[in-house]
Amino acid sequence: MKFKVNGHEVFASTGGRPFDKKKPLIIFVHGSGLTHMTWVLQTRYFAFHGYNSLAVDLPGHGLSSGKSLKSIEEMADWVSDVIDAVGHKEASLVGHSQGCLVTVECTSRYPNKIKTLSLMGGAGAIPMNPELLSLAENNDPKAVDLMMDWAHGPAGHFGGHPVPGLYHINTGTMLAKSRTIENTLGVDFRACDNYKNGFEAAKKIKCPTLSILATDDKMCPVKEGKKLASLIDGSQVDIIDNCGHMMLLEEADRVLTVLKKFITTNYPPLSA
Amino acid sequence: MSDKKKELKPNTYKFDTLSLHAGYQPHKNAGSRQVPIYQTTSYLFDDVDHAAALFNLERGGHIYSRISNPTVGVLEERVASLEGGTAALATSSGMSAIFLTVMTLCEAGDHLVVSSQLYGGTVNLFRLTLPKFGIKCTFVKPRDTEGFKKAIQKNTKGIFGELVGNPGNEIMNMPEIAKIAHDAGIPLMVDATYQTPYLCKPFEHGADIVIHSLTKWMAGHGSSMAGILVEGGKFDWMQNDKFPTMTKPYEGYHGLSFAEEFGPTAFTMKARAEGMRDFGPCLSPQNAWNVLQGIETLSVRMKKHCSNAEEMVKYLSNHESVAWVSHPSAPNHPDAELANKLLPNGKGSMIAFGIKGGKDAGVAFINNVKLASHLANVGDTRTLVIHPASGTHSQMDEATLKFAGLSHDMIRLSVGIEDIDDIKNDFEIGFRAARKPRLVSNQ
């Protein structure tokens, strides 16, 4: 569906179901340079089971208009604005990678609005490799190739997509190259690199929180994810073996199973 | 210790490694090193919720082997990885892959621009069968790049061609024709059976959908029928209103918009969800496994195919019984420059040549070679020959044969990977017979 935030058109996938204001809202926030499509194996389930699933394209990404936001703090405020724009007072947030920084910051800023927080491949800070950052800011497609290499675990490099016939790495590459690299990935990487408030923000979070981490995640290693989780009261941690940073595709079923249990328990769906 | 800074390089697997490993994780299959053959029609659901989730495309997995199968899925991912595509869908044959591609793209009332130099079966599909579904085609000679542009109409939904035409070896200017297609907001579909991704990856030259008859070089062994369509993932289905079945809510899946939900894999998702459900040209797991065995040695075989073909081009070009030779490696081939650009790893192993003495000589040649097999296939590891005017293209009338670039003296040769001297010796027997067709023909 399309709606406006701060004068710019926003696209969000509703998981193939019409948006219904009566249903509780879950907002999915994608990682650097990517789009709503990374969430396809999570959003559709919730959409068919009593929720409004909104997998947003951040400004300047995917099908959303406007320019990419330059800081994690701006993105956090923007997520809060999305909740308002679709006529809701509260939401459950799910973030991946950079989306974790955004949702952690958003939850700390708007504690009354955010009911649960689910982090996948999250960390309190995501400092960027300077060469990778430079490649992305200079519109070099090698930045995407490197990101796809590092983002997939050893098993994920062989493929084995849960949807028959889809090949992970090339699909991710196409998503990241669908808009100008310097204006999406470059801006996002710089925002991640600049963001220093993750650990302080985490200390303010009081809502139920889940961290899904993966043993072969090179971009946000388990150690960093656990460090972030340790700062959030009562945070649950689930660790997936033989999986890399792109866990939402590499181990989509496992992620969905854990996410489903966590969200339905802490933020129940609208009964049929 | 060196303080020289190491350049960052992606360590994703390269072609030869992907040929052996892509799409398969042993630890998820009881540690089986070889891809298992899932010889089953259907798959247990965990519970009712799981079943509904699979039917609604809420999660990945298998329901029924007409739609998908784990062994076939490995093949699909492997070919997608080798082509540089986002997704693939395997079918029971190359022809069913073409049909499924067209039916996923088009509706009654639509139009396609099609290269005239195609496999005979494909020509018949576009010329005779698709009009019965309300889909019309305009044929354009593959070298007539501007002709493709001129043939585009308001209702044109795509351009289709073979990179190297069958059987005349004319090369389509894929980058230019891709630009023409994209300027018109339509996709370019390329049948790259002759090349395999080892020789050419059409997505790197602008193609949007690649089709293979896997029966041919990809498998190599000539034991199994199979086809596949592969999606490049770059084409924006939402750029115009030409593709409502991709962009508008689809009643068959609760109002799903394939383009919105699946983006770079939307075409394959629709081809599977709609096409395999409704037409059902599924690939058997046994044949998928057989093709996988062939793909494991694809690059090794293609090198030998190409080197043998180049030797045969030299041999035929200097032979007294040969009137003309067509192969992209021949220096006098009109598309040699384009071939060097698009086919840097080799020009393939399909040769067309004219035999002196016309049709009778051609028949005598075919009937007398002993090592080369006379049959209606190409891309086998064994050398194959056929006389198209009396075989693969025999259902065409005289005018259509001419338009398709065929002549009665033409022999189509698919060079195998036997010892090159044995192939040449066998051809000498055929040529001797061709020079005296009435004396030695066994007809």
Image: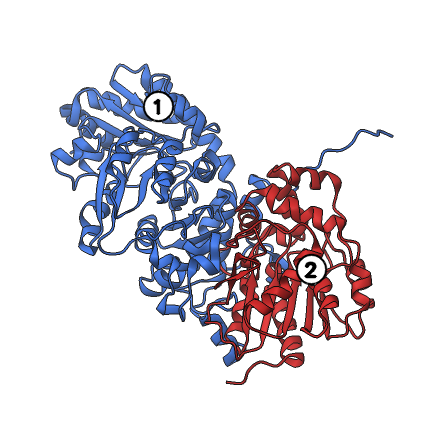
Chain colours: A red, B blue
Residue found 38% across the figure and 48% down from its top: B223
Disc 1 and disc 2 in contact, CB within 8 angstroms: no
Q: Which mark is residue A104?
A: none
Q: Amino acid at mark 1?
A: Asp
Crowd tier of the residue under label 1, counting other residues whose Cα lies within 10 Å: few below 14, some 14–19, many 20 or above: many
Q: Foreground: B372 or A51?
A: A51
Q: Quadrant of residue B89?
A: bottom left
Q: Secondary structure at mark 2?
A: helix
Q: Is residue A43 visible?
A: yes
Quarter occupied by the N terminus of chain B? top right
- The amino acid sitting under disc 2 is Val
Mark 2 surroundings within 10 Å by alpha-carbon count, few (fewer than 14), some (14 through 19), many (20 or more): many
How many numbered circles does the render carry?
2
The CA distance from mark 1 to mark 2 is 54 Å
> Between B108 and A18, which is closer to the camera in this rendering?
A18
Please indicate whether residue B271 sits to the left or right of residue B302 in the image. left
| Quadrant of the image containing the C terminus of chain B | top left
In-image side of B387 versus B291 (left or right): left
Chain identity of mark 1: B
Query: Label 1 belongs to which residue?
Result: B335
Dot 2 corresponds to which residue?
A: A102
As displayed, is residue B315 above or below residue A238?
above
